[in-house]
Amino acid sequence: QVQLVESGGGLVQAGDSLRLSCVASGRTFTIYHMAWVRQAPGKEREFVAGIYWSGGSTVYADYVKGRFTIARDNAKNTVYLQMDGLKPDDTAVYYCEATTSTGGNRYWGQGTQVTVSS
């Protein structure tokens, strides 16, 4: 089992920045990939950014590319999402997601609310 706890959300204005953090605990040695996903009211959950735990390669959704940056600190079992140039469309609950190499299990945190006012 892997437990995830997100933090860093809040209410900001368009153009502002926020940094989200996600701390993993439990069987962290099994983590293969971590990602941030988000869900806005009335919409499907969507992928935002992902990072491979070992090599550190990253992937971004087109709608955040150039504005958001995902990074990890393996020693702290923490993944970050630096969000710059926030837009009202970025308003959503942001969830941290971990995928393990053992059985490909997937875990999520409780989410952190990001609200961007225009």
Image (cartoon, rainbow, N blue to C red):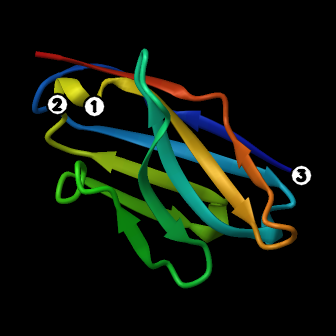
- Please tell me which residue lies in front, 98 or 43: 43
Can you tell which mark lies on residue 90? Answer: 1
Answer yes or no: do the residues labelled 1 and 2 have beta carbons within 8 Å? Answer: yes
Distance from Cα at disc 1 to Cα at disc 3: 30 Å
Distance from Cα at disc 1 to Cα at disc 2: 5 Å
Q: Would you identify the image quadrant in which residue 102 lies?
A: bottom right
Q: Image height check: is 73 above or below 87?
A: below
- Residue type for callout 2: Lys
Distance from Cα at disc 2 to Cα at disc 3: 35 Å
Check disc 3 and report its element: helix, strand or loop.
loop
- Please tell me which residue lies in front, 51 or 23: 51
Q: Which residue is drawn at 60% across and 73% down?
A: 53
Side of 32 where 102 appears, left or right? right
- Please rate how many residues cluster around mark 3, counting C-alpha atoms within 10 Å: few if below 14, some from 14 to 19, many from 20: few
Q: Would you identify the image quadrant in which residue 3 lies?
A: top right
Residue where numbered disc 3 is placed: 1
Residue where numbered disc 2 is placed: 87
